[in-house]
Amino acid sequence: MSKQRYKAFQNKKYYLAFNTFPKTAKNVSKVYHTGFRKWTSDDMYNYSIVLGTARVIFGIKRQCNDVCCG
């Protein structure tokens, strides 16, 4: 059985993560389907590319205010 591996690097402005996952993860969530995906979270603009069982996530951190950071 293969394990999920995750390694992330970040500084004050950017976030970069490398993720490998088992093939069965594709049956659980669309985030593991091959292709490009972009979304906005409370603290970042995120972009990911999935090829096979590997995913790279790049994030640009947003300015935080009372609404997003509570």
Image (tube, grey):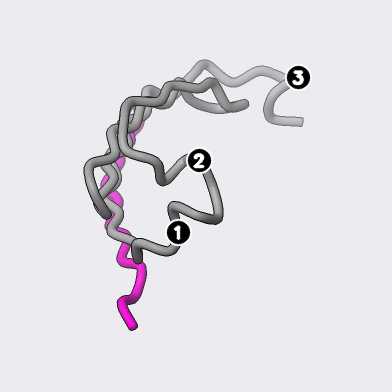
What residue appears at the point 66 percent right and 18 percent down from the top-left corner?
65
Q: Is residue 61 above or below residue 23?
A: above
Label located before the other in sequence (1 or 2): 1
Dot label at residue 67: 3
What residue type is disc 3 on? Answer: Val
Q: Nearer the viewer, residue 1 or 45?
A: 1
Label located before the other in sequence (3 or 1): 1
Q: Nearer the viewer, residue 4 or 52?
A: 52
Looking at the picture, how far across and down is residue 11, in whole percent? 30, 37
Magenta segment: 1-15
Marks 2 and 3, how far apart in space?
28 Å
Query: Which residue does the numbered mark 2 point to in the structure image?
Result: 30
Disc 3 vs disc 1: Cβ atoms closer than 8 Å? no
Q: In front: mark 2 or mark 3?
A: 2
Local secondary structure at mark 2: helix
Dot label at residue 40: none
Q: Callout 1: 10 Å neighbours few (<14), some, many (20+)? A: some
Dot label at residue 25: 1
Marks 3 and 1, how far apart in space?
33 Å
Q: Which of the image's four quarters has the C terminus?
A: top right
Q: Quadrant of residue 12?
A: top left
State yes or no: residue 7 in magenta.
yes
Q: Nearer the viewer, residue 32 or 57?
A: 32
What residue appears at the point 69 percent right and 30 percent down from the top-left corner?
69
Number of numbered discs visible in the structure rendering: 3
